[in-house]
Every structure is written in C-alpha cells, then in structure tokens.
Amino acid sequence: MRIVVHGGAGHTGEVQDGVETAADVGWKLLDEGADAISAAVATVVVLEDDSRFNAGTGACRRTDGSVQTDAAVACNDGRLGRAAALEDIANPVQVARLVMDEDFDALAGKGALDYARSRGITPAMVAGSEKPWAGDTVGAVAQDASGAIAVASSTGGVSGRPVGRVGDTPHWGGGLWTDAGIGIAATGIGEAISRRLLCFRVAQQVADGLSLAEALEWGLALYPADVCIGLIALSDSEGAGASNASMPWALRQD
Ligand code: ASP
C-alpha cells in the first residue's frame, strides 16, 4: 500500500504540514482496509477544507471575482469521474467521485451543480481566496491492499483566468492518468499540461523502462523553467514526486 499527496506546484506558503496531515488521513484509511478511491478522495477532501490550498474552500477567483472549481477521480479499474467549472460546492472531488459511477464521465457548470444537489450534496457559498494564487491545486494517488490505484485531484484553477475556463485537472491523460500498475497526477499551469498530454506521456516512459523518478524528470524537462509544473506518481513498487518549482508533497508506503 502507498499514497502520495501534493499541495500544488509553485506554492509559496508554509503548507507542508497540511500535506502531511492529509497524507496521514489517507494512509490511516488504507491501513484500516479502505479502497484506493476512498483513500485518495478523503485525502483531497482534507486539502479542500484547508483554505491555504487552491481547491474547495481556498479556491482562487476568476477574473470577474467568481469561484469555479474542477475536480477528477480515476481508478485503474477503468472508472473516471470529472466535474468542471463547478460553483458553490465546498468539496468538488466528491462530485467527481459520484460521477465515476454513472454512465457518463464528466459534468460541467450548472449541470454539475444540479447533479450534485440531486445526489444529496448541499451547495454552499464558496467565497474563495483573495491571495494571488498562481496555481496550487491538490491531488493524491493511492494504492490499496488489493493493488488497485486511484487518482484524485481538485483545483480552483489558475488566477487571472476567465469564467468557464477548464484546466488540466479533469483532463484525462493531461492532468491525471492511471492504468495497470501506474497512477499520475499533475499540477501547475493547466494549459501547458493539457497541450502536452503530460500524465499519459509520463506513464508511457515508465512502460518503456524508466524508473518513476526518471519518468517524472522526463516530464518536467518538456517545459521551460518559467512554466510551473509538478507531478506525483505511484507504481506497483514505488512512489515519487517532482516539480520545477516548490511543491509540498508527501509519501507514505509500507
Ligand atoms: N493545474 C491547475 C489548473 O491549471 C492549477 C494547479 O495545478 O495549480 O487549473
């Protein structure tokens, strides 16, 4: 079993303690027998509830002052759930988790909010953060005792972006990827991540023989130094995190 957690590439605050707390929550759940999806989602909820991070309660504001969030959950059993441009939901990752069990895999905007409401999630005003965030998404990748791997991510996006902008966080293969023996989540400038299909391509490097750490470095090397990027990943035998900027991250494994 293992879990790796990040608190966003380019985070400038002292937030390592928040990531450690979230990792401990996820690890305890795995240790108690929880499945990878439950552990990854619960870990991200802890970070969404910590307003120092750009997700859930601490999500950054759009250019008009509104708050819209994106989230995604995927499992290497083939399930995928995504919610985009979601308003008035404190824990968007829980909406993505519900979508995972539907016969569609993504909802956006009003439809996502209506769906959340219909599934018993009570909307709540999310004021968002006034801090000038550059990013600072949150994410977790967990592997449970059965070997299943799940990825969960949540973000308020990147500051200065317009209403309706959707970043990489719910972009399958861009912001997250999981397949047999691998799970990857990205953070940083979403447009740069999506355009290079970053997580899928990093996973291909592992399939071609690179170690996890080497593959993450390969992914970072696709970018110039001023494009903030971070990655966390698990394989069947190891966990790793890497960024070209400061990125709080934590790993627990047995
Ligand atoms: N990747 C996220 C986005 O572009 C932001 C982040 O990772 O901090 O929406």
Image (cartoon, grey):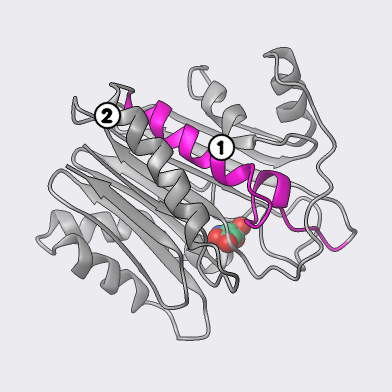
Residue 26 inside the magenta-drawn segment: no
Separation (CA) of disc 2 from disc 1: 18 Å
Q: Quadrant of the C terminus?
A: top left
Q: Give left or right: position of 39 versus 171.
A: left
Q: Quadrant of the N terminus?
A: top left
Residue 45's mark? 1
Q: What is the residue that sits farthest to the bottom in this orientation?
A: 225
Q: Is residue 181 above or below residue 207?
A: above
Q: How many numbered badges does the structure rendering display? A: 2
- Where's residue 126, x and y in %? 81, 42
Residue 174, visible in the rendered structure: no
Q: Give left or right: position of 46 versus 52.
A: left
Discs 2/1, front: 2
Which image quadrant is residue 181 in?
Answer: top left
Region in magenta: 35-63
Between 63 and 48, the one lying in front of the other is: 48
Three-letter residue code for mark 2: Asp
Between 171 and 39, the one lying in front of the other is: 39
Which image quadrant is residue 167 in?
Answer: bottom right
Residue 36 inside the magenta-drawn segment: yes
Q: Is residue 68 above or below residue 225?
A: above
Tell me the quadrant of ligand 1.
bottom right
* Residue located beneath label 2 in the image: 31
